[in-house]
Amino acid sequence: MASAPLYNAKQVEKKWYDYWMKNDYFHSVPDERTPYTIVIPPPNVTGVLHMGHMLNNTIQDVLIRRARLKGFNACWVPGTDHASIATEAKVVAKLKEEGIDKNSLSREEFLAHAWEWKEKYGGVILEQLKRLGASCDWERTKFTMDEDMSQAVIKSFIDLYDKGLIYRGYRMVNWDPEAKTTLSDEEVNYEERQGNLYYLTYAIVDSEEALTIATTRPETIFGDTAICINPNDERFKYLKGKKAVVPIVEREVPIIFDEYVDMEFGTGCLKVTPAHDENDKILGDKHKLDVIDIFNDNASLNAEGLHYEGKDRFVVRKEIVEELAQKNSLLKTEAYSNKVGTSERTKAVIEPRLSDQWFLKMEDLAQPAIDAVLKNEEVKLFPKKFESTYRHWMENIRDWNISRQLVWGQQIPAYYYGSGKDDFVVAATAKEAASLASKKSGKKIIPQELIQETDVLDTWFSSWLWPMSVFDGIRDPENEEFNYYYPTNDLVTGPDILFFWVARMIIAGYEYTGKRPFENVYLTGLVRDKQRRKMSKSLGNSPDAIKLIDEFSADGVRVGLLLSSAAGNDLMFDEALCQQGKNFSNKIWNAYRLISGWEVDHTTDQPTYAKTGLAWYEAKFQKTLLEIEDHFSKYRISDALMATYRLVWDDFCSWLLEIIKPPYGEKIDSKTKQVAVSMLEKNLTILNPFMPFLTEELWHSISDRKKEEALIVSAWPQMTKTYDTTLLESFDQAVQVITAIRSIRKEKNISYKDSIELHVLNTDKNTASHDEVIRKLGGISAIYHTDSAVDGALSFRVKSTEYFIPVEGTIDVEAEIAKLNEELSYTQGFLQSVNKKLSNERFVNNAPEKVIAVEEKKKADAEAKIEAIEKSLASLT
């Protein structure tokens, strides 16, 4: 065990990651061991490592590394998600830079560009995860558009369609005009925005009167096909059977009556635009109104917009207000705040739009997933508080719009053979589809006559199969790996995709296997900056993850992230946390250097202080090991790290090493060094999941080890549920005694060169078991146990035991007495002022309980201090 040079994190990290990879330590195959499986939440193939990824994947790596050490067959499956909307947007932008219009390309040509982009940029984030130390089974890396994964998605679609759960319908959907695709309800975020309420006048046909209607969207008047009034509104009953004229358009529309209208909102009159509002569509169907679509797919107005054709909806809003004012059709404008739906992906304002789409019926599918979390607890959420969110979403679930108007993704396996609404079949191939179409139509149809649906499936429709499809469980549910690794154990993800992904995976798991996809869901908080803002590229407040690793080391960043990351609570990120992690690395490294530098004398007996210190640390280690186990069982990963941190930094480095360190210039006995090294190895083992690089480096530095003896595949320390509590309690008292002695030396300027004695006034609870430790660390020449107080000595109390340090000849007694009298006088005056306040009935009756408690504490502290000073004075006089 040679003395170590200074720690070089960059060099160490590359060396050991290459070593782990070369020796296949991350790879798992089914065997006789119990499996422990986690699947990575697949990051977007467009992504680069950000702080959320860093936190999430550090937690997963901690769990998987600990499972390996505990003897499980640990398998962590990595991969990426094809992210239809985000990736297609990236490819379209790239093509635009090259002067290529997406619309000028065939589907095959566009996909060729998309795959080219994916091959060039798609692996960036996974390579960055390796820098973090992620011990994924890289041989199992999956991509949601891999051929086998796509086949699983198509098989799932066909199965659900054949069960009558998937249908095609003409529905009002959320349209993203930037991505030019529909979105599910869950992909729409609602933001409070300041806008205006425009009061427009609609002339009544064959009348001099007009109706006033309030709207936030005057540009939609081109799609108006009725005016609706509540039948109970006495103001407007005379208008039954009448018509109104839409301004600018000059279209006559019926005035209809329906209780849907809120008589108190606006003017009590509602313009009905069935093509661009879900509730208006319901009214339109009920009253058989015309449906007029006024928008192009990019939210510009089409020919129905007359002279505004081709202009963006928000441009039209400004211009049409001016035209309405000129035509005396704008009565007034008021500021108005309302919620506006925006795309979760592109941030564009959503446009409600009628469209033929594919939907999955969710109500019956959701019930087993509701029971699994909320009734049977087969799937547990950590923290538990998210169960209420889960309940709200699942019990109000709506049919899932699973089609997207994109090219990048799994093309829906529906084939059209005619112009009728139901002239389509669903099949895996055109050949199978032709056979089905022939049977359905009663005439011979060949594959070349079919037209496949151009829409692709929602990306979530592939990732909801992830825990199954990564083991080929959809295509081949009887295969060995699927039956060995599934169900998985833990899922680590963010609460923002609790419904998008987690709930849907639970639904899919029960639908296809009758089993939960995972047992525990650990929901991390969001990473925020010091101002509590969510970290994002747009705000420019998210640090470069790789630069952080370069500056603070991977271990330092991992520790920094986890130190303040309680489950479900947002992390206020500060680079100082990473510095703290780096400092911890240096502390451990220096502890190793200290131990490795001790020369051994094989002829020396083990000192009592060393024997006592090592026995104490073994008990402390076992106590902490139980605490760590409890924290992990409750997914308090931050608490598990803090318990480990305190054990290593405080108990091992600050106390144990000081206790066993040989006197200056002397050698250490062989038994003490041997046990100290063993203790260091145990520390490295429990630290390894959190700090894999540093611990592996030290593990091999301590001893030349064979390949199969690497720390990553060693064993978690043996845990015993019993330990010497008396030893721990007596050591805690010894620590207080040593701290008090050191304080006295500092306050009284007593050098460690000056020999001092310690006299202990015996009590029933006193023990001398740690006297040698106290002697060594307190610089005490001798300890005497006495039955009476010692005159002419400084004193202090720890618990019920009183300690005396004779100071004659060591300090100026007269000066010390004068100093104590001055301190006594000040403290007595302070106590008098506190008592005066507490004896004031008006203060006591009116002050809050907390304030009274603070004053009571001041009184007790002052009284204790006076007692101590008086005893010190008595011992000196």
Image (cartoon, rainbow, N blue to C red):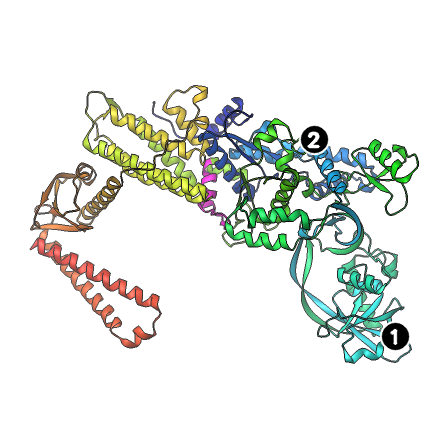
How would you rate the neighbour count of disc 2 (Cα within 10 Å): few for under 14, some for 14-19, many for 20 or more? some
Where 164 falls versus 448 (above or below)? below
Label 1 – label 2 distance at C-alpha: 62 Å
Disc on res. 242 = 1
Seen from the viewer's position, the closer of residues 432 and 106 is 432
| Residue at the spot 40% in from the left edge and 43% down from the top edge | 642
| Residue at the spot 28% in from the left edge and 66% down from the top edge | 855
- The part of the image, by quadrant, that contains residue 213 is bottom right
Task: Give coordinates of residue 237: x percent, y percent.
Answer: 81, 78
Q: Quadrant of the N terminus?
A: top left
Q: Is residue 151 visible?
A: yes
Q: Is residue 246 visible?
A: no
Would you say 231 lies left or right of 384 here? right
Disc on res. 346 = none
| Residue at the spot 63% in from the left edge and 52% down from the top edge | 394
**Kind of element beneath mark 2:** helix
Which region shows up in magenta? Answer: 555-578
How would you rate the neighbour count of disc 1 (Cα within 10 Å): few for under 14, some for 14-19, many for 20 or more? some
